[in-house]
Image (spheres, rainbow, N blue to C red):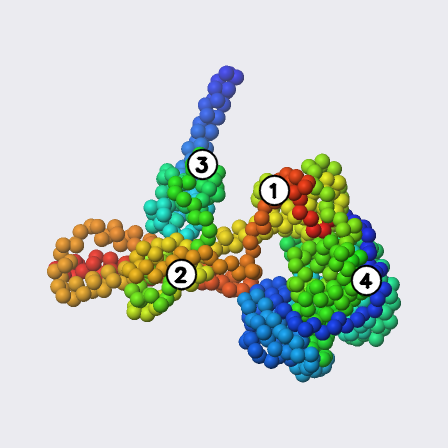
Amino acid sequence: MALTFDYQGGIYPPERKSRSSQASLQYAPLPARVTLPLRQHSGRPATACVTPGQHVQVGTLIARRDGLISADVHASISGTVTQVSEHAIQIESDNLDTRQPLAPLDWRETDALTLLARLDESGVVGLGGAGFPTQVKARVIERHAIDTLIINAAECEPYITADDITLQRYPGEVLEGAQLMASLCGAGQIVIGIEDNKPEAIAALKQAITQSRPAPITLGVIPIRYPSGSEKLLIKTLLNRTVPSLGLPADVGVLCHNPGTLLAALQAVRDGQPLVQRVVTLTGEAISRPGNYWVRLGTPIDELLAYAGLERSRLDKVVQGGPMMGSTLETLSAPATKTTNCLIAATQSELPPAPPASPCIRCGACENVCPVQLLPQQLHWYARAQEDDKLERYHLFDCIECGACSYVCPSHIPLVDDYREAKSRLRHQRIEAAKADHAKHRFEFRQARLAREEAEKQARRHARQAQNRPGAASSTEATAAPQADLRSLRIAQTAAKAAVRKAEKVLAREAQQAPNESHEDLEMQLATARENLKAADLQLAQARQSASAPEESP
Amino acid sequence: MSDAVSLWGIISAIGILTGLGVGFGALLGAVSERFKGDAHPLVDQIDALLPQTQCGQCGYPGCRPYAEAINEGDALNKCPPGGDATIQALADLLGREAEPLDGDAPEENRVAFIREAECIGCTKCIQACPVDAIIGAAKQMHTVIEDECTGCDLCVDPCPVDCIDMRPRSAPLTQWQPVMPFTASVITSDRSPAGGN
């Protein structure tokens, strides 16, 4: 068993996991209609590639990934496409549940590129909650050396038991999926991070570990504490490596995957089954049959809850995700998506509404529980005062929004809401600034182009004049002025040359550092510099001509 | 004797210090002359605060010329697209008094839209666009690239057939929208049920 390391902060909220972890994993009934959003992952939404009326089977590609960070979406039931909107695709079931699988692959015999392509065309994304496309994560080795793959089974949020049940039911397959991902990213070892409140899953894993090849697997059982399942904290706890501020786990040679994701990746490769279903925890006191269910993506949430025995009279609100970080749903007609790991149908007494916030009394309780060692109080003041430079200096963007500070706050201040608001404001500002910069570069490019065109016109006019009246025009221009002009033009041309060289250098450096990103702005700056150089060249040539003309003519 | 020495000491000290002062002064002067940059850093800073719509509503042909004018003492309040936020930022940067905006701030982010059926292909709007956001050719239909359009509405006036509208910019779901800022003090009875705890 791996040695575990400690981190500061964290809280111990009531777990409330037993209700859903008692029942065995079941299949939710096939929905009559599914609504599949085009954006169930982080990144850009997928582009629909079906039309209304088209017949689809389970696993038919209905929306293609758009851009680098995006994921394919597949039909989760067989039937007819009824509606394709800007945001979602609706499919009416034919109740036949016919499948359209891809060809099964043996990952041990298949090369990495084929496997990555398979993960790509199966639409597998991280099922822990963020929904980052798995194939993009696997490609991280193009820039970082990875030595360890962590299976993040901590599941520290109250209520959720989806990973627990997945590991109890499919321990061997999850480990096989981990071996697959480890071989893809070249990780030499696999570490499982699991909280000690899941004895059955731990027992199942212990048995499965003995048969798993080839990478050695260590089981890291960690004590219960919220939020130890946060990627960076888990890496700290298991490996004693600290992910740098604003950095990624890959910066310290680690990749984290959720057990559900590993299972989905294995099913995509071994069975050729795209991501069309996932395990969702349905729990809360307002439902009578809590448990974990295999749910087809796109199933309406009210249908799911009704199947689990929802008592509408007791229902107060439905929370998607955990009670700490999840969000209250506005409408129950929303579909379950790739990132829906838990639905809590809570009664009024179970998750009571937060009491009204009082002013901060500077007790410092939030600082003691912050797992990433920020100063929540200071951030709170600065967020409310919109002091943006101070927010950045106090590392607002390292906040993992775990909600521990709000949980312990004796004044019931919704601190995390402040941070989210401030983060969104800052992100928006950055986007606006980038746009303004882009517009500026386009404006400069246009100015440079107009100047070059003007210079070309001048040059042509000059040449025409020289042709028509050889020697005649020059006598009037033979003064000292062109000489001084020539010098300043020569300086301008040298400066333009230097600007082109600088722009080329910057572009080359950026292209080397981030080969996959678009450098449109830098390319435009280079083009602008080139236009400027051309204009300067033309002006210089013209000035030289008019300067040398008087010497020749006499 | 000692008086004479100290007098010499005083004179030589004054001499040396003066010499050093003159020497370093000359060196600094020569260096600043030798490595003088063309770019005006303050103009760059002012330019960075302007919204870069290149709309010309300030009376200058683009944001950079206005930045140069501000540096030479022009008023800060001539930029309607930037609004009060830009005026405030400029006032902070330059240590001047913030003035109320001269003109009306646009209520929303807008883009130009060409009603393509009515376009006669005159290319007048293309010539007017400061950021090359309109594509088309003579006697061919023109259209606006929405992502590149800054909403400056300089293309609207030149159009001989009035086929250009300013429409609200479409915001994709993926784009970050500023979250509604909460009200500072909430009366208990007005409070909506809060999510989480």
Instruction: Give the spatial CA distance, label 4 vs label 1.
Output: 38 Å
* Image x and y of residue A403, in percent: 72, 50
Labels in figure, total:
4
Cα distance, mark 3 to mark 2? 34 Å
What residue is pinned by disc 3?
B98
**Label 2 sits on what residue type?**
Phe
Disc 4 marks which residue? A288
Residue B104: numbered disc: none
Please state if B111 lies on the left or on the right of A340 as rendered: left
Mark toward the viewer: 4 or 1: 4
Q: Amino acid at mark 1?
A: Thr
Disc number lying in front (2 or 4)? 4
Observer able to see residue A234? no
Q: Is residue A233 above or below residue B191?
A: below
Secondary-structure class at tag 1? loop
Tell me where residue B66 appears, x and y as whole percent: 37, 45
Which one is earlier in the sequence, the residue at label 1 or at label 2?
2
Mark 1, residue position? B183
Front residue (pair A23, A401): A23
